[in-house]
Image (tube, helix red, strand yellow):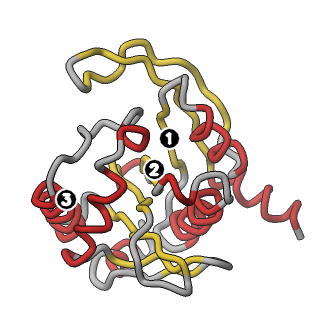
């Protein structure tokens, strides 16, 4: 019942925002990905270890591309319109087509923090998820101390649903996460209120 689910995974959709191009991540993005994923402040709340080599960035990109090819994930590379340099990624994983649900995730180079870029990019992929992929629910998890991520989600209309105690095991420890979600009906209502 996903109206355009097949088209999402047959030809990678390039999306545009006021300032950004959201495009397919390529292997030649590895150096730029490594540049920011090798920073502790970027991976602090991420379930990926801080990268220590460009080869790890290549492996990460290969994994993203492989999961896209089999319809398990779609992750856009974020670039500014005046440059093709990768500055972050955002996208959907934990896809559950039978339940019209996906989980969203993202990260951004620290040089671009606090400029509203992730809020803008996330708004566009949310629109794509609801209007093109046929999603009914988009979930997001964030570590309670990650207030920046919480704000990005709130600005995009996500509603807090609760604390999941010791939900994930990452970096050799169990961690609590907050869960929030956005429903298609809430998204439509939010869009109508902006008109």
Q: Earlier in the sequence, mark 2 or mark 3?
A: 3
Could you tell me which secondary element the residue under label 1 belongs to? strand
> Is residue 187 positioned above or below 78 on the image?
above
Question: Do labels 2 and 3 touch, CB within 8 Å?
Answer: no
Residue 56, image quadrant: bottom left
Question: Where residue 184 sits in the image (x, y, percent)?
Answer: 63, 55
Measured Cα–Cα span from mark 1 to mark 2: 5 Å
Quadrant of the rendering where the N terminus is positioned:
bottom left
Tell me the crowding category of disc 2: few under 14, some 14 to 19, or many 20 or more residues within 10 angstroms, Cα based.
many
SS for dot 3: helix
Which secondary structure, mark 2? strand
- Asked if disc 3 and disc 1 are in contact, CB closer than 8 Å, the reply is no
- The residue located at (84%, 64%) in the rendering is 192
Q: Which residue is mark 2?
A: 104
Mark 1 is surrounded, within 10 Å at the Cα level, by few (under 14), some (14 to 19) or many (20 or more) other residues, namely many
Q: Which mark is residue 57?
A: 3
Alpha carbons under labels 2 and 3: distance apart = 20 Å
Q: Are marks 1 and 2 in contact (CB under 8 Å)?
A: yes
Using the image as rendered, state which of residue 161 and residue 47 is in the foreground: 47
Q: Nearer the viewer, residue 70 or 109?
A: 109
């Amino acid at each position: 019942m996903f109206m355009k689910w097949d088209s999402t995974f047959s030809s990678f959709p390039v999306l545009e925002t006021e300032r950004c191009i959201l495009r397919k991540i390529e292997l030649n993005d590895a150096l730029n990905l490594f540049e920011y994923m090798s920073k502790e402040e970027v991976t602090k709340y991420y379930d990926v270890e801080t990268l220590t080599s460009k080869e790890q960035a290549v492996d990460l990109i290969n994994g993203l591309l492989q999961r896209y090819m089999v319809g398990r994930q779609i992750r856009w590379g974020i670039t500014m319109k005046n440059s093709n340099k990768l500055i972050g990624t955002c996208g959907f994983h934990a896809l559950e087509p039978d339940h019209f649900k996906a989980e969203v995730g993202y990260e951004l180079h620290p040089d671009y923090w606090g400029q509203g870029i992730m809020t803008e990019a996330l708004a566009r992929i949310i629109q794509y998820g609801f209007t093109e992929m046929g999603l009914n629910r988009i979930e997001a998890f964030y570590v309670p101390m990650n207030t920046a991520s919480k704000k990005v989600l709130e600005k995009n209309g996500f509603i807090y649903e609760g604390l999941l105690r010791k939900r994930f095991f990452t970096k050799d420890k169990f961690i609590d996460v907050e869960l929030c979600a956005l429903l298609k009906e809430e998204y439509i209502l939010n869009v109508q209120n902006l008109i």
